[in-house]
Image: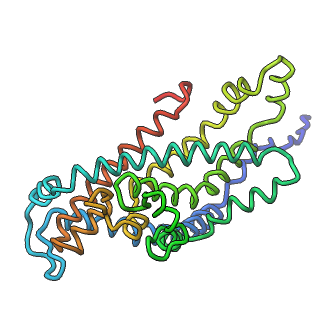
């Protein structure tokens, strides 16, 4: 007589729980909803105007008449052939170099000054940052009155010295640079200060224990570790200087003798004064945009560390 022994059913391995697709779709939808407002602003305020400028640069487009047909590349030839084109480029580059050196150097120096723990640290930071709260157009109007030979408080002193703020090309340039340094030094100091506070204090302490001097600390620790901040501030300063407009339009109107016409001011003049030609002005704008992109790429490559690769 045989006995049948009941066998236990073999346990089957259960499949891992699948990630609900509904949660993934909900997360993707939430991401698109968060990104939509920014995307709308970028498209409306950058992509569409950029496309319109590209179209205008390749067409005959008078200020009051609108589209009059295609004429590429005539607008670019007229832009390059403008009698102020080379002079505006030279002046803008000169102004950019001077403004960048002054703002970056002074911003770093002020940041190192207010970084030290002193009883006057808060007062110094506040005093230096106050001009940054004033708009550039308002600051330019303020300095326009200050530099005025008729109503300016310093006009009697300048008259006795036989000097002027805006009467000569060099005086107009340096007077404008003084305005820019007064207005933006606090902003760049703040950026530099954030970068300095991100450097670990242990690195400085270890270097001091090895006998490093202040100059060696600055050269071998502060500057290398401040490279990202220097890259950011340099890009911001160079870009802002190449696009300078308000300070020269308000203070000098391009004078004296058209010696302080910036590239952007030339674009404004071609578009709304004199030629009233939006097509040529758009061509100038496209050229300026190309130079800006090239300059920013070169700056970022220059500040890239060797171990980061191309």
Instruction: Give coordinates of residue 163: x percent, y percent.
Output: 43, 57
**Does residue 143 appear to the left or right of 12 in the view shown?**
left
Q: Nearer the viewer, residue 154 or 14?
A: 154
Q: Is residue 142 above or below residue 114?
A: below
Above or below, 129 relative to 45: above
- Quadrant showing the C terminus: top left
Please tell me in which quadrant of the rendered image residue 245 appears: bottom left
For the residue pair 25 and 216, the one nearer the viewer reads as 216
Q: What color scheme is it?
A: rainbow
* Residue 180 x %, y %: 51, 58
Vertically, is 142 above or below 157?
A: below
Residue 226, image quadrant:
top right
Q: Which residue appears farthest toward the front when viewing the image?
A: 160
- Seen at 41% across and 41% down, the residue is 297
Residue 37 visible in this rendered orientation of the protein: no
Q: Quadrant of the N terminus?
A: top right
Residue 34 pos. (x, y %): 58, 68
The residue sitting at 48% across, 55% down in the picture is 177
Residue located 64% across and 30% down the image: 224
Snapshot quadrant of residue 21: bottom right
Residue at (45%, 64%) from the top-left corner? 159
Residue 273 shows in the view: yes
- From the viewer's perspective, tell me whether residue 27 is left or right of residue 78: right
Q: Is residue 201 left or right of residue 83?
A: right
Q: Nearer the viewer, residue 186 or 55?
A: 186
Q: Nearer the viewer, residue 172 or 235?
A: 172
């Amino acid at each position: 007589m045989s006995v049948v022994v009941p066998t236990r059913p073999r346990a089957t391995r259960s499949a891992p729980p699948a990630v609900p697709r509904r949660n993934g779709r909900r997360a993707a939808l939430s991401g698109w909803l968060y990104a939509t407002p920014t995307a709308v602003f970028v498209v409306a305020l950058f992509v569409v105007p950029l496309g319109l400028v590209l179209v205008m640069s390749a067409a005959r487009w008078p200020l009051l008449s609108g589209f009059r047909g295609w004429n590429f590349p005539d607008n670019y030839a007229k832009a390059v052939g403008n009698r102020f084109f080379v002079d505006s480029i030279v002046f803008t580059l000169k102004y950019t170099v001077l403004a960048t050196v002054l703002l970056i150097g002074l911003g770093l120096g002020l940041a190192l000054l207010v970084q030290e723990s002193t009883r006057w640290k808060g007062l110094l930071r506040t005093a230096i940052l106050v001009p940054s709260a004033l708009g550039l157009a308002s600051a330019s109007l303020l300095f326009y009155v200050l530099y005025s030979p008729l109503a300016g408080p310093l006009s009697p002193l300048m008259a006795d010295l036989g000097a002027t703020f805006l009467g000569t090309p060099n005086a107009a340039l340096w007077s404008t640079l003084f305005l820019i340094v007064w207005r933006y030094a606090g902003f760049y100091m703040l950026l530099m200060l954030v970068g300095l506070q991100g450097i670990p204090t242990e690195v400085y302490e270890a270097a001091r224990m090895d006998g490093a001097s202040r100059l060696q600390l600055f050269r071998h620790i502060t500057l290398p570790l401040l490279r990202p901040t220097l890259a950011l501030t340099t890009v911001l300063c160079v870009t802002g200087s190449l696009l300078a407009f308000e300070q020269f339009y308000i203070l000098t109107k391009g004078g004296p003798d058209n010696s302080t016409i910036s590239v952007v001011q030339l674009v404004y003049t071609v578009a709304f004064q004199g030629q009233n030609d939006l097509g040529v002005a758009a061509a100038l704008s496209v050229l300026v945009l190309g130079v800006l992109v090239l300059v920013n790429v070169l700056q970022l490559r220059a500040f890239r560390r060797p171990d980061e690769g191309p």
